Image (cartoon, helix red, strand yellow):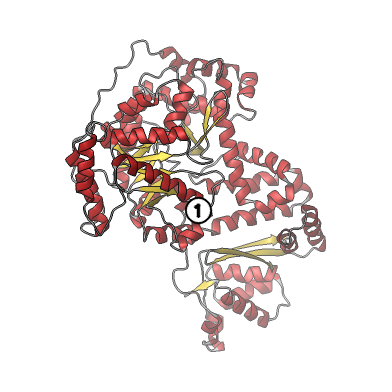
């Protein structure tokens, strides 16, 4: 039974460009939505931003890697992290997408379409039940933009979405931009979609922009909301009543003023329909009565799924929350809509499933899943699509090198002359590669500068093929790059380039490492102790600290990039350091929200590593002497004092 729908007003998706504004408390919108997986770290700037924003306004957690229709359910570790984040932030609600995206522990970082069959419906409902049990809350599922459909589909998408919500008692995030994209790509009417969705299940709208690529429309979230999306938004408001809306702008994120203007536009359009501002007025305190009266005037349009009194009660609950009359949360349950799932078509092409089930012996390696042969065939179909979109060279390589797979895909996926099968698969393949390449470029900016765009793209392609992502957070996809880089001609000639990659990977990890458990120690903490107590002193390193030893001094290379010099100067500086024969390591740490790096000698690295492993100062000195027998103890004391000034140890 669905609960009374909270009303948050109109918000925006919060992205990294506006984190500074968020920390200053300058987000002048009703609420924000954030990507859940971006906040799975243990500390640092992301969580600080989230907690600061949550103190000011409602926050919604919106995931992209749940993969609710994937062959295996979301991992226990994923659900643990999401539950911990939810308990910490107390979001207004948690949402993700009605799609699939992971297979055998690997993540595509794409929102892949599901076959719309009874088997897929059963699996999704089963997974939603498990997720809601693990989180201790109901979730919202969002309709996705899609670029292919399956010949085995037996349920319209809108009925599939509604039936998932009914069977699992979940809610719906209705992305109006996605409705338009899929309507164009697959030939249905957007209004038909809206008519089939039960109003009481719709808790949120997404508003965004898409691009026209000729044969199809593509959901890119780049630019202002389109006129036809605004028109569908107004139609949805008239059909469902006041629903919280959010503007998504993920690519080329604009200045805050432009993003806020889009949010204000959503608010103004809602106000024009309902004849008042739906932002709660704590002075007047008469929102419920005004909305109820307006809903009664609109009659069937605004109150199609419920009476004016129910609409007034829901807005009254929102008013009470903002006025402090009761804690935010779910209100009184109301009756939900229902539908009967269409029976399986007797002509369902079982021969296609049978063919697909023999595509790959690898299917048996997947975790076992409850269910019948149809469920196993569903997994085989998903594996076929996964194999095609992850094949280097895309659909052309599949046609050339894997004719059996190509024939099976043709039997599985619908196509048109204007938008053929290969082009449909390549939309997903190219989008995944573009997304993963972008993430690698963010993690390894110095390596990108050094290699240049073209060679970095070649390296990224090798990494994506040889070391697929094993983490739901796109920001952690770089683990496989250093091992792959080690096998290249670059590393054969310049081995230090692998150390550079390891260093950049570690720096990225430190950005959201745990914060110090207590105040950091200062030099006075050492000076206050008598010298005779120093040998037994043990120092606890901060969590955001790494020591990478055994390599050339990368300091000159970093300095070249920081000065804006060409990459050729960086190569020359690193090769000169290598020719010197001096062994050096890198000390990495985070202070506040900024990550620092400096070169350290082999002896300094040995002392610091020993302290990090729990050795007393005397034991750390022994480690240093092993690396540098002539080392003066006073130098070690100087290092320790510098480390304390840099905040590397906590009390």
Dot 1: few (<14), some (14–19), or many (≥20) neighbours within 10 Å? some
Can residue 76 be seen at all in this image of the molecule?
Answer: no
Locate residue 444, reporting x and y percent.
64, 51
Locate residue 263, reporting x and y percent.
42, 47
* Picture layout, residue 487 above or below residue 542: above
Given residues 13 and 648, the one toward you in this image is: 13
Q: Is residue 431 left or right of residue 149?
A: right
* Picture layout, residue 561 above or below residue 521: above
Q: Quadrant of the N terminus?
A: top left
User: How many badges with numbers are in the image?
Assistant: 1
Q: Regarding mark 1 in the picture, which secondary structure is present there?
A: helix
Can residue 300 be seen at all in this image of the molecule?
Answer: yes
Residue occupied by mark 1: 256
Locate residue 383, reporting x and y percent.
49, 27
Quadrant of residue 398 in the image? top right
Q: Is residue 419 left or right of residue 113?
A: right
Residue at left offset 52%, top offset 42%: 470
Given residues 285 and 3, the one toward you in this image is: 285
Locate residue 126, reporting x and y percent.
32, 33
């Amino acid at each position: 039974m669905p609960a009374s729908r909270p009303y948050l007003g109109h918000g925006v998706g919060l992205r990294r460009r506006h984190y500074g504004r968020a920390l200053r408390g300058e987000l002048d919108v009703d609420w924000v939505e954030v990507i859940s997986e971006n906040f799975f770290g243990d500390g640092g700037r992301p969580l600080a931003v989230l907690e600061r924003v949550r103190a000011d306004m409602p926050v919604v957690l919106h995931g992209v890697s749940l993969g609710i229709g994937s062959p295996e359910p979301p991992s226990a570790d994923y659900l643990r992290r999401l539950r911990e984040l939810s308990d910490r932030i107390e979001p207004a609600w948690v949402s993700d997408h009605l799609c699939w995206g992971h297979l055998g522990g690997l993540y595509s970082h794409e929102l892949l379409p599901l076959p719309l069959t009874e088997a897929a419906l059963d699996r999704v409902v089963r997974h939603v039940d498990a997720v809601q049990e693990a989180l201790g809350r109901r979730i919202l599922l969002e309709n996705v933009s899609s670029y292919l459909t399956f010949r085995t589909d037996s349920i319209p998408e809108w009925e599939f979405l509604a039936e998932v919500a009914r069977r699992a008692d979940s809610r719906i995030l209705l992305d109006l931009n996605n409705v338009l994209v899929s309507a164009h790509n697959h030939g249905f009417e957007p209004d038909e979609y809206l008519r089939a969705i039960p109003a009481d299940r719709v808790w949120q709208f997404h508003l965004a922009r898409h691009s026209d690529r000729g044969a199809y429309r593509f959901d890119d979230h780049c630019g202002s909301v389109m006129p036809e999306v605004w028109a569908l938004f107004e139609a949805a408001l008239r059909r469902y009543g006041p629903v919280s809306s959010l503007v998504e702008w993920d690519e080329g994120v604009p200045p805050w003023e432009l993003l806020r203007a889009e949010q204000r536009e959503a608010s103004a359009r809602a106000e024009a329909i309902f004849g008042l501002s739906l932002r709660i007025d704590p002075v007047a305190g008469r929102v419920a009565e005004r909305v109820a009266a307006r809903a009664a005037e609109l009659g069937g349009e605004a109150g199609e799924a419920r009476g004016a009194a129910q609409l007034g009660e829901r807005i009254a609950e929102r008013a009470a929350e903002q006025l402090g009359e009761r804690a935010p949360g779910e209100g009184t349950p109301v009756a939900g809509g229902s539908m009967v799932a269409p029976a399986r078509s007797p002509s369902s092409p079982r021969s296609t499933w049978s063919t697909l089930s023999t595509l790959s012996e690898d299917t048996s390696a997947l975790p076992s899943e409850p269910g019948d042969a149809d469920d196993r065939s569903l997994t085989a179909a998903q594996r076929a699509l996964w194999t095609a979109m992850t094949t280097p060279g895309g659909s052309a390589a599949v046609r050339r090198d894997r004719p059996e797979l190509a024939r099976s895909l043709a039997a599985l996926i619908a196509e048109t002359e204007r938008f053929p099968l290969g082009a449909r698969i390549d939309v997903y393949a190219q989008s995944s590669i573009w997304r993963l390449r972008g993430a690698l470029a963010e993690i390894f900016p110095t390596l990108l500068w050094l290699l240049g765009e073209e060679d970095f793209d070649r390296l990224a392609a090798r990494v994506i093929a040889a070391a697929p992502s094993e983490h739901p957070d796109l920001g952690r996809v770089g683990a496989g790059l250093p091992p792959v880089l080690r096998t290249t001609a670059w590393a054969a000639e310049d081995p230090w380039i692998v150390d550079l990659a390891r260093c950049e990977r570690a720096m990225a990890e430190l950005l959201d490492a745990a914060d110090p458990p207590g105040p950091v120690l200062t030099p006075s903490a050492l000076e206050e102790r008598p010298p005779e107590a120093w040998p037994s002193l043990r120092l606890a390193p901060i969590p955001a600290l790494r020591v990478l030893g055994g390599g050339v001094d990368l300091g000159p290379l970093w300095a070249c990039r920081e000065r804006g010099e060409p990459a050729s100067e960086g190569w020359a500086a690193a090769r000169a350091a290598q020719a010197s024969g001096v062994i050096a390591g890198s000390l990495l740490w985070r202070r506040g929200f900024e990550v620092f790096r400096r070169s350290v000698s082999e002896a300094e690295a040995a002392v610091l590593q020993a302290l990090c492993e729990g050795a007393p100062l005397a034991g750390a000195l022994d480690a240093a002497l092993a690396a540098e027998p002539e080392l003066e103890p006073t130098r070690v004391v100087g290092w320790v004092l510098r480390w304390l000034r840099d905040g590397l140890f906590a009390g």
